Image (cartoon, rainbow, N blue to C red):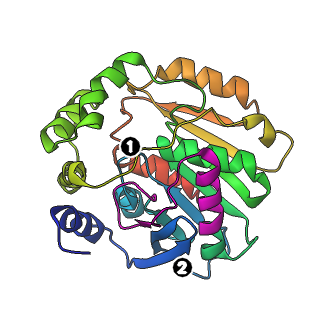
Amino acid sequence: MSRTPFRTAYDQALAQWPVPVEAVDVPTPYGVTRVNSCGPADASASPLVLLPGGGASSTVWGACVAAGLGRDRRVHAVDLVGEPGLSVPAPGRAVRRVGDLTAWLDALLDGLVGPGGGPVTLAGHSYGAWIAAHAAAQRPGRFDRLVLLDPTRVFAGLRPGYVLRALPMLVRPTPARVRSFLAWETGGAVLDPAWTRLQEAAAAFPTVRPVTGPRPDLARLGGLPVQVEVLFAGRARCHDPGRTAAAARRALPGARVDVLPGVSHHALPAAAAEEIARLLDPPA
């Protein structure tokens, strides 16, 4: 890949990870998926697979790694196919439906841990949490834990005001529109400059339309040994955090559901890196 502003910003963000990172390209029917892995390859704990939100890349998890994530287990941070990152979609095999997403993730896990290998801890933020929830509902036996960080369209729809505010950035993204939207959603919070540069550079990235569809059928997780944990951002503008957390508790009575005060949706996961690192990889 040529040295574009996006690639430069991507490499700078990844360079901030304080541990050695192994970049792996995993072939799937939907394209080659870039995975940035760290942590001991021979760890006894199940591997942790991380899915970023829409418009983000695997590099977004760097603050969590700096907070200790991956110290005692193998961590695989994924660039979603069709989203900003170094994954390369297969020509003529676009990810268009929920079934394509779950088939892509299934093939990716086969490449990372072997066909049928497991169990795996699966975590995602925002759109990545929506993908993770669908995957766990379809193949619950493949996972020992499911961690959803401020999931969108899993327990509630998006607020109309949020969609209207995001629409100009989504229809014709520019660095200025990305910067303006993030400042609005995060309430002007101080964000990591390397991450901000990458988000602005992603405005020129040739992405495909994100997959939309129904909410995952989480009832399929009932009665199965999948530990589910959901963490909502207390200042999220994409949905009402309190009401959405209540909906999560009703949908998943056995899950651990918490609301993290003072943090916005798009400031995650960096703004709560220590809490998220402990949640994803609790000390033994």
Q: Nearer the viewer, residue 104 or 181?
A: 104
Is 107 covered by the magenta stretch?
A: yes
Q: Which residue lies furthest to the front in this view?
A: 92
Going by the numbered disc 2, the residue's amino acid type is Pro
**Residue drawn at (45%, 59%) of the image:** 81
Find residue 259 and report its horizontal and vertical position in percent. Answer: 51, 30
- Front tag of 1 and 2: 1
Find residue 136 and report its horizontal and vertical position in percent. Answer: 70, 49
Residue 126 in the figure: left or right of residue 216: left
Residue 277 in the figure: left or right of residue 21: right
Q: Nearer the viewer, residue 100 or 143?
A: 100
User: Which image quadrant for residue 114?
Assistant: bottom right
Q: Residue furthest right?
A: 223
Q: Can residue 125 be seen in the rendering of this structure?
A: no
Q: Element type at marker 2?
A: loop
Q: How crowded is mark 2: few (under 14 residues within 10 Å), some or many (20 or more)?
A: some
User: Which image quadrant for residue 45?
Assistant: bottom right
1 and 2 marks in contact (CB < 8 Å)? no
Which residue is disc 2 drawn over? 40
Q: Which is nearer the N-term, disc 1 or disc 2?
A: 2
**Image: magenta residue range:** 80-108
Task: Quadrant for the N terminus, please.
Answer: bottom left
Which residue is disc 1 drawn over? 268
Is 204 covered by the magenta stretch?
A: no
Measured Cα–Cα span from mark 1 to mark 2? 25 Å
Going by the numbered disc 1, the residue's amino acid type is Leu
Find residue 177 and report its horizontal and vertical position in percent. Answer: 17, 36
Q: Is residue 65 above or below residue 244?
A: below
Q: Can residue 200 be seen in the rendering of this structure?
A: yes
